[in-house]
Amino acid sequence: MAKVFKKTSGNGGLTLYLGKRDYVDHVDKVDRVDGVVKLDPADFGDRKVFVQLACAFRYGSDDLDVMGLCFRKDIWLQQIQIYPNGEKPALSAMHDTLLKKAGDNAHPFSFEIPNNLPCSVSLQPGPDDKGKACGVDFEVKTYLANEKNNPDEKIEKKDTARLIIRKIQYAPSQVGAGPKAEICKSFIMSDKPVHLEASMEKDLYFHGEAIPIKIKIKNESNKTVKKIKITVDQTTDIVLYSADKYTKCVLNQEFGETVDSNGTFDNTLTITPLLTDNKEKRGLALDGRLKDEDTNLASTTMLRQGVEKEVLGILVSYKIKINLMVAGGGDVTVELPLNLMHPKPEGIFFYLVEPQRLLEIYINAFKMILTLMPNYFLAFVLISFPHGAE
């Protein structure tokens, strides 16, 4: 195992171990959360040790929580007792590794995440925002308590250890045909219209992947198409509490192609929406983050049949707008839906980062090898980059 994630409580009596922090939603099932808690029960007294996995929706800041205005709602929660006389799960390979790492007095646990829960999403905070980001998150917590479910019992912070994990979803292996839209618009003082048709090759693209848009223009009017503007809008629909809906532009790109009166245009224009171009936009939906830079634009929410929207907390969607800027005539616009997701990793080495950062990682590793082994001939072959994502 490359890395073990652990967190120790303030009192030193509880240490939580996890082998990974990304858990994949495979549509029919979700990766099981296997972990271990190492105990030092000297100061436990009569208290018991519990482990909890919670999926929660946060729509407010820590400051408001302190004021008694709690904007956090548990969507799903499960608790198990592991000491004394705790539940004994069937041991997995992950358990075996973590038990060896933790040593004596370590207790394993397992959680099954229901497949109807949302994936991790966070809303990008502003420069002055403090505390946890708003959004949907998953948290594994171990704590000391006298009873399993007693709302009147106060759990001290020093008696808890917690780790945030992510529930993520990869794109399906099969993609469908791309969307197509067209419009015919007439103008005042012009007998004939402008025809615009836009289409894409497929219905789903990966984060960081270039998106080619085929555009056909037939200008029968007496006006000139001055330029083409393409925008990508992200719509975040907060469905848990109310019908709040926010739209943020994540790409705004202009192309200088002109189409004169009675002229035509038939070409492909390429765009790539990236989080790196939107770092300052407060409220932008991101895939759930574990640290400041470890994320990307939020993936499109894929709705399953039979799942109520309210359970998902936050719905994320994208649309592409193709605008023809017509001199003295206004705009000619069509819209195309866009699905953004992560590809399934094809190996062990996979990062949820943008391609530019992945390339930087490879280059830095190469430089380090050259520094350590200057007298050797090194062949650094990148057979293929996984489609990274933001």
Image (cartoon, grey):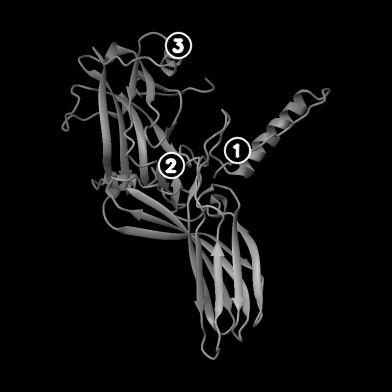
Viewport quadrant of the C terminus:
top right
Circle 3 residues within 10 Å: few <14, some 14–19, many ≥20: few
Q: Which residue lies furthest to the front in this view?
A: 177
Residue at x-position 42% and y-position 60%: 247
On the image, the x and y values in percent for residue 342 come to 51, 42
Residue at x-position 51% and y-position 53%: 177
Left or right: 344 with respect to 224?
Answer: left
On the image, the x and y values in percent for residue 106 come to 36, 13
Q: Which amino acid does label 3 sit on?
A: Lys
Circle 1 residues within 10 Å: few <14, some 14–19, many ≥20: some
What numbered label is drawn on residue 100?
3
Residue closest to the eye, 379 or 197: 197
Q: In this view, does 384 lie above or below 259?
A: above
Badge 1 vs badge 2, beta-carbon distance below 8 Å: no
On the image, the x and y values in percent for residue 53 come to 31, 30
Single out the mark in the foreground, 1 or 2: 1
Disc 3/disc 1 C-alpha distance (Å): 32 Å
Left or right: 320 with respect to 108?
Answer: right
Q: Which residue position holds label 1?
A: 386
Q: Which residue position holds label 2?
A: 288
Q: In which quarter of the image is residue 83?
A: top left
Q: Which amino acid does label 1 sit on?
A: Pro
